[in-house]
Image: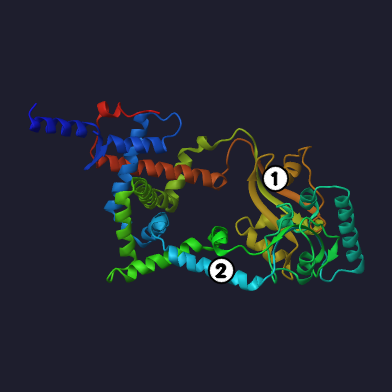
Amino acid sequence: MPLLLALLSVGAYAQDNDPVVMKIGDEAVKRSEFQRAYDRNKAAETSVSDYAQLYINYRLKIAEALRQKIDTTSGFRNEYTTYRDDALKKYIQDPAYEDSVVRSVYDRIKAQLKDSDILSVSHIFVRVPQKATAAEKARAKARIDSIYNVLRGGADFAEVARKCSEDYVTAQRDGKLPDFGPGATLREFEAKCYSMKAGEMSAPFESTAGYHIVLMHSRHKLEPYEEKKADLIKALQPQGLDQMVFNHAVDKLVKASGGLTREQVMDKMEKEHTAQDTELRNLIRDYREGLLSYDITKKEAWDKAAADSVGLRAYYNKNKKKYRWDKPHFKGFVIHAKDDKLLSEAKDLLRHHPADWRAAVKQQFTKDGKQDVIVTKGLWTEGENRFVDKYAFHSADAVVANNKNYPSIDVMGKMLKKGPEELDDVRRLVTSDYEDTREKQWIESLRKNTKVEIYEDVLKTVKDH
């Protein structure tokens, strides 16, 4: 075979190896890209042909967003660049600056410790209020002594800490405190801990906060910087070390750019790194396109549906049967009052102020900043509210505990057995359905104005994993 024909043959094979699966307007979608999207997004039992229609809708949304220049709006740019910059962090680093930050923290720890040990302890704590009476303090002392006796009898310290310690944060960690040195905790607690040996358990002792029992796990000198560095980096991450180092590195790039803005520098870095890293390129592109799709759908469908009160009501009137229910709903108020007289007054007020009931209740039943009556309005099925269960559904299983502050309780309203009484009863559900309807209508209009071609022979070669 002549060399030219051989090259043409190889070129034709390479081209056919990733054929176009569909054209959406001027956009040609290669099979590899469609396969990647299908593998990433397909729901269970979604066929390739069904997903093709969803994919077309998605690409149409993106094209419309670009046509309307959504990608140039400040809202889009702020959200997109925040995500993009976070994705680029691993490529834009300054190890020397990070090392200087971590080393400065290490030096402060070293200066604070001087030559003292770092302590690793667990404790069990019983709180004593600052203005505790003698009786309260005696009860706390009796409790800590009882716990100590249990521990001396062989009980597991971690288990007892979980069950008995009133330091609820450390109790979840078996009583374990973060490692510490001088000046990091209460003076009495610190003095006791520094007097103990590794493996020793203290008798109960008192601090300004209450009573403690301490188990000393270990005590040791501060490790050399190189040994401690990894642990310090890990500890500093939640405090924003990564972001600090990233910002410093970007600032250096801006200064060295010859007049570019921060945004221009980051755009340049995006182009450089996405050209080399396929995974990063796909990650950033997917986020960008997903954000474009969301923003344009919100603008053209969801926001317009939310603002169209006339259309929403017409949709509800046309589809009322869709919102019927198969079990009764109680619609009305749950009322809690300080006495029966106030309860009766509240019911009377609610009968005469159905629209502005909340303001009326607040005005009439608030004294010295405290409410004598609390009213909740809602729509409930049996099992959703124990007060409604007891006073509206008269359920024998409903348990309502006595409330000494609001002992008088009742409900007021009506039972809706077959369906909603008005739009407000199901507004959230109807609004969601109406938004979906408006979105479908909008997509239909996009399809009418865009030529779409699916190459079925190529589509059949897409793998349905």
Quick one: quadrant of the C terminus?
top left
Position of 256 with respect to 364 (left or right) is left
Q: Quadrant of residue 331?
A: top right
Q: For marks 2 and 1, give the CA distance.
A: 53 Å
Residue depicted at x 78% and y 48%: 159
Residue depicted at x 47% and y 46%: 313
Residue depicted at x 48% and y 46%: 431
Q: From the viewer's side, name the closer residue of 78 and 161.
A: 161
Q: Quadrant of residue 393?
A: top right
Where is mark 2, residue-wise?
105
Look at the image and tell me whether residue 83 can be seen.
no
Look at the image and tell me whether residue 192 can be seen.
yes
**Residue 146 point in image, percent of width and height:** 89, 54
Q: Is residue 147 above or below residue 453?
A: below
Q: From the viewer's side, name the closer residue of 225 and 250.
A: 225
Identify residue type, mark 1. Asn
Position of 203 with respect to 346 (left or right) is right
According to the image, what is the colour scheme of the structure?
A: rainbow
Find numbered disc 1 in the image and state the secondary structure of the residue it sits on: loop
Identify residue type, mark 2. Val
Q: From the viewer's side, name the closer residue of 198 and 169.
A: 198
Position of 277 with respect to 381 (left or right) is left
| Res. 236 mark | none
Quick one: quadrant of the N terminus?
top left
Position of 393 with respect to 243 (left or right) is right
Find numbered disc 2 in the image and state the secondary structure of the residue it sits on: helix
User: Alpha-carbon neighbours of circle 1 within 10 Å: few (<14), some, or many (≥20)?
Assistant: some
User: Alpha-carbon neighbours of circle 2 within 10 Å: few (<14), some, or many (≥20)?
Assistant: some
Where is mark 1, residue-wise?
385
Q: Is residue 317 above or below residue 252?
A: above
Between discs 2 and 1, the one toward the N terminus: 2
**Residue 87 point in image, percent of width and height:** 41, 54
